[in-house]
Amino acid sequence: MLLSRRQMLCRCGMGFAALGLTDLLSSQGLLQAAPTARSPLTPRRPHFPGKARRVIHLFMNGGPSHVDTFDPKPALARYAGQPLPMPNLRTERRTGASFPSPFRFQRHGQSGIEVSELFPHVASCIDDIAVIRSMHADVPNHEPSLMLMNTGEARLIRPSMGSWVTYGLGSDNQNLPGFIAMCPGGLPIQETQNWQAGFLPGAYQGTYIDTRHTALNRLIENIRNPAVSPAQQRQQLDLLAELNERHQRQRQNDAQLEARIQSFELAYGMQRDAEDAFDINREPAHIRALYGPGVQGRQLLIARRLLEKGVRFIQVWHGAGQPWDSHDDLETEHRRLARECDQAIGGLLKDLKQRGMLDDTLVIWGGEFGRTPTVELPTPGANAGRINGRDHNHYGFSMWLAGGGIKGGQVHGATDDFGFRAVEHPVHVHDLHATILWLLGFDHERFTYRYAGRDFRLTDVHGRVVRELLA
């Protein structure tokens, strides 16, 4: 049997030296206690009482156009077909003349906030929503912008926002993952990096669920064990846990082993609780009708049921297979995409509110960036495009927040007259993350994890709390 140096020291005739070393390290506070059996998902308190207890992030993959959804720009119609008087207009590709929105905007609610005709159901909840019209990111490319929005870092591997939140708060249900990523029809760009745990323990990584499926064994792979009964499986897990814990005692702080132990227990717990959580047929007919038909209605209703059962952070993707990336046919594609999700999002907000859950549930809507106010032109030498879409735009775009300590019925910030650049109260992605953490009870500058000799945080070395958004 191979022995480590420490084991060799303890077993040889000079084992008393190990006793002396133990006493010395203990007296200097350098001896680390043996790991306990406490689950990494055990609920924990934040720095201070937060208004939000859980988060649902509605991610519109591909970059929805802000000037066609939540940021009306009538000046675009005045310059229709003409170059915009903006000498500093820069985009990723070639763009041409002003492209007015093909959609009507109308005021809604007591707040009178203008919302596009694409989102009538969301607009009916506008008094509970804070629209940020001055978001901005770093670059106009999908991959780094997805990483920035989801992890706070555009290039290097970092824990995702859901992983940070679950690390900080744990979960209220030990039989379900603390962080779930619902993405129907396959993985988006950057795949599982969007919900990765990075250098955090593996227990905080998002659990991927393909909500295109309806059968439980298709939603969650290997949710049933056809070979043994639940009682026999419990005996197997108990034996395995004993062997793993014995192995772990000799290898303190082995994150991979700890994650493996927790994954076995979580998988067993999900066999008991998942069937109820994912079965929307247990909901009354009028609630199912509130969310509407289709994949989006079903997955948002599942999300609400998971929130009720104590899941801490749920990311719901829309447009993973056919994204909001409308370089061509913007009118047709944005209308189709909005029709798929508008009723479900409006239904979610109404359902959370009528159950008293909106007060402590933070709802986030948006993509990785916005789109240009000008029409995109085909690249020289390439096949001619339809010249009826918009390019990527990270200089200014819109997102909105609701519930969880947010002051609804307000618009924060503004882009210029044409919707190209954030000019009034700009909000960077780091500022958004700092505000989200504050609503959950965390000071983003103190909420850190030590790795490789450095204290890391979701906001890196940036970020400020946007206090105007707070109730």
Image (cartoon, rainbow, N blue to C red):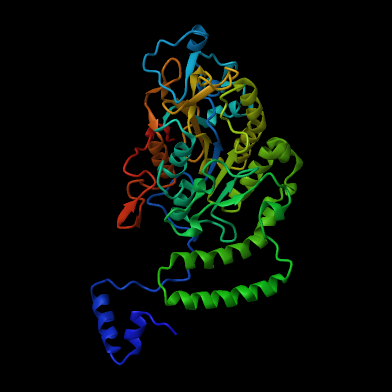
- Which of these two is toward me, 150 or 97? 97
Q: Is residue 18 above or below residue 383?
A: below
Tell me what residue is drawn at x 53 percent, y 31 percent: 128
Asked if residue 467 lies left or right of residue 75, the reply is left
Q: Is residue 131 visible?
A: no
Tell me what residue is drawn at x 38 percent, y 38 percent: 430
Q: Is residue 287 above or below residue 13?
A: above
Asked if residue 176 lies left or right of residue 466, the reply is right
Specify the quadrant that holds the N terminus: bottom left
Specify the quadrant that holds the C terminus: top left
Q: Position of residue 438 (x, y in %)?
A: 40, 43
Tell me what residue is drawn at x 48 percent, y 62 percent: 40
Asked if residue 84 lies left or right of residue 263, the reply is left
Q: Quadrant of residue 382?
A: top right
- Which of these two is toward me, 200 or 26? 200
- Which of these two is toward me, 456 or 433? 456
Q: Position of residue 73 (x, y in %)?
A: 49, 15
Q: Position of residue 111 (x, y in %)?
A: 51, 22
Q: Is residue 165 visible?
A: yes
- Which of these two is toward me, 289 or 374? 374
Q: Quadrant of residue 285?
A: top right
Q: Is residue 27 above or below residue 41?
A: below
Tell me what residue is drawn at x 47 percent, y 36 percent: 406
Q: Is residue 342 above or below residue 162?
A: above
